[in-house]
């Protein structure tokens, strides 16, 4: 439900000229969100599992501590995965298989 709501807000902001988000959501922002999304897709299960383990080991009585820890773990692990694996793979692909300028 939250994901669908977020997508609706992004689409509304993209197609509405009067909203502040439409001024911020340019091609570069969409490009970087798209780049990071695959890393997040791959890393979020591991990050969620790690966050659950940290919360269970800490014996915290506050149940609200899980979500911030999970979000930090997801963002950090996705960033590290992108830098160490995905970006290098993209650079290697571009080096080994150069793009044909006539097809762009």
Image (tube, rainbow, N blue to C red):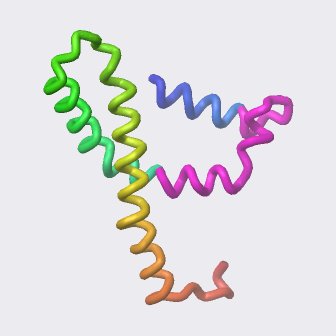
Residue pictured at 37% horizontal, 66% vertical: 84
Task: Using the image as rendered, state which of residue 44 and residue 69 is in the foreground.
Answer: 69
Query: Which image quarter: residue 72?
Result: top left
Instruction: Place residue 9 in its image quadrant.
Output: top right
Q: Is residue 49 left or right of residue 69?
A: left
- Camera-side residue of 31 and 88: 88
| Coordinates of residue 35 in the picture (x, y in percent) | 51, 57
> Is the magenta region chiefly helix, strand or loop?
helix
In the rendered view, tell whether residue 2 sits above or below residue 34. Answer: above
Say which of 66 and 93 sits in front.
66
**In the figure, is residue 96 to the left or right of 69?**
right
* 22 left or right, relative to 33: right
Residue 86 position (above or below residue 21)? below
Residue at the spot 36% in from the left edge and 58% down from the top edge: 81
Q: Is residue 87 above or below residue 96?
A: above
- Residue found farthest to the top: 61
- Residue 26 colored in magenta in the image: yes
Magenta-tinted stretch: 13-36
Q: Residue 50 magenta-drawn?
A: no
Q: Position of residue 13 (x, y in %)?
A: 72, 34
Q: How far across and how far down the image is residue 57, in percent? A: 14, 26
Residue found at x 27% / y 35% = 48
* Image quarter in which the N terminus is found: top left
Dividing the image into 4 quarters, which one contains the C terminus?
bottom right
Q: Residue at x 50, y 82 (%)?
A: 94
């Amino acid at each position: 439900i939250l994901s669908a709501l977020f997508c609706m807000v992004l689409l509304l902001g993209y197609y509405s000229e009067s909203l502040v988000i439409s001024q911020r959501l340019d091609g570069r922002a969409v490009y970087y969100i798209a780049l990071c999304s695959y890393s997040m897709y791959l890393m979020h299960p591991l990050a969620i599992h790690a966050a659950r383990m940290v919360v269970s080991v800490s014996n915290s009585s506050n149940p609200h501590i899980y979500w911030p820890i999970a979000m930090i773990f997801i963002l950090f692990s996705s960033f590290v995965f992108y830098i160490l694996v995905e970006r290098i793979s993209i650079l290697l692909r571009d080096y080994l298989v150069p793009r044909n300028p006539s097809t762009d």
